[in-house]
Image (cartoon, rainbow, N blue to C red):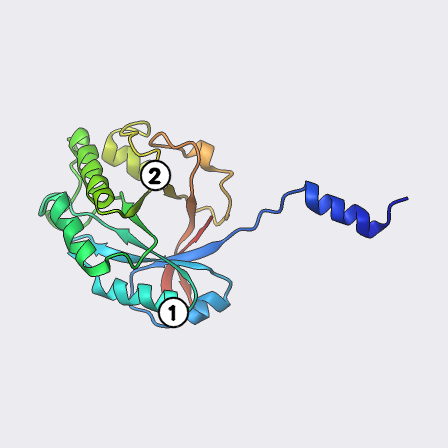
């Protein structure tokens, strides 16, 4: 008869272990990322480009602080459709952040800044603008992902299935069910992605005295 330890060893080999990696995204200036790491979070996604059309130098310092604390560091890019071309915005972002981040995530959601909102009727124009942003970043050798939710994508692109040109890029999707799991995605799928890469599962919370959203992969 096999010993208990032998059986346990066989179980550990046969049954894969899934370990959730948790992280935060934030826009406020912050310098205590060690607190976030000690709370069990392993990555930070900082704001890299602001909704009104400017690179975020505060975000750059946040990125450096996060990496110094041992966190994986990415950036998100909140594009302004209307004031500047995709090329100009990417150039501004890239001149500040260069290659200090891992992936830059393009934020596809309602833009409240004056003159920067997505069109409410020209869905093909919205899709083309997103393609332009992604292409400009790709031409600079940057790793690019897309952030959105099913609702925001449908509102901006015209339907959940529209603008399905980015499935080769990783998807970071938002669904606030406070559940760090991808089990909900099939119900909230959009944009042609069959599998997401990151989930934002809790929004507008506080961790280590700073406002953050919580994410996992």
Q: Which of marks 2 and 1 is nearer the N terminus?
A: 1
Query: Is 63 or 191 nearer to us in this picture?
Result: 63
Q: What element carries label 1?
A: helix
Name the residue carrying label 2. 169
139 displayed left or right of 182: left
Query: Is 154 or 6 nearer to us in this picture?
Result: 6
- Coordinates of residue 132 in the picture (x, y in percent): 18, 38
Across the whole image, how many numbered discs are drawn on residues?
2
Q: Distance between the residues labelled 2 and 1?
A: 27 Å
User: Residue 119 occupies which quadrant of the picture?
Assistant: top left
Label 1: how many Cα within 10 Å (few below 14, some 14–19, many 20+): some
- Coordinates of residue 99 in the picture (x, y in percent): 27, 56
Image position of 16 with respect to 166: above or below: below
Tag 2 near tag 1, CB within 8 Å: no
Residue pictured at 26% horizontal, 35% vertical: 155
Residue pictured at 35% horizontal, 36% vertical: 150
Residue pictured at 15% horizontal, 32% vertical: 125
Say the numbered circle drawn on residue 198. none
Image position of 130 with respect to 112: above or below: above
Label 2: how many Cα within 10 Å (few below 14, some 14–19, many 20+): some
137 displayed left or right of 205: left
Residue pictured at 19% horizontal, 49% vertical: 112
Q: Is mark 2 on a helix, strand or loop?
A: loop
Name the residue carrying label 1. 68
- Coordinates of residue 184 in the picture (x, y in percent): 48, 38
Image position of 34 with respect to 74: above or below: below
Query: Is 77 or 200 nearer to us in this picture?
Result: 77
- Coordinates of residue 188 in the picture (x, y in percent): 41, 34
């Amino acid at each position: 008869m096999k010993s208990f330890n032998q059986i346990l060893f066989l179980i550990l080999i046969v049954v894969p272990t899934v370990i959730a990696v948790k992280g935060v995204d934030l826009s406020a200036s912050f310098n205590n990322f060690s607190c976030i790491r000690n709370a069990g979070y392993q990555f930070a996604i900082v704001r890299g480009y602001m909704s009104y059309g400017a690179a975020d130098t505060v975000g750059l310092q946040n990125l450096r602080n996060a990496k110094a604390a041992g966190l994986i560091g990415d950036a998100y890019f909140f594009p302004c459709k209307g004031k500047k071309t995709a090329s100009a915005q990417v150039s501004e972002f890239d001149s500040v952040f260069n290659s200090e981040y891992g992936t830059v995530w393009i934020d596809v959601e309602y833009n409240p800044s004056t003159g920067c909102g997505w069109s409410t009727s020209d869905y093909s124009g919205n899709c083309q603008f997103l393609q332009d942003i992604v292409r400009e970043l790709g031409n600079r050798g940057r790793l690019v992902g897309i952030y959105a939710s099913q609702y925001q994508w449908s509102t901006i692109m015209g339907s959940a299935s529209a603008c399905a040109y980015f499935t080769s890029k990783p998807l970071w999707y938002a669904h606030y069910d406070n559940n760090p799991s991808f089990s909900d995605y099939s119900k909230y799928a959009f944009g042609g992605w069959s599998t997401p890469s990151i989930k934002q599962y809790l929004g507008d919370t506080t961790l280590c005295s700073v406002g953050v959203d919580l994410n996992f992969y």
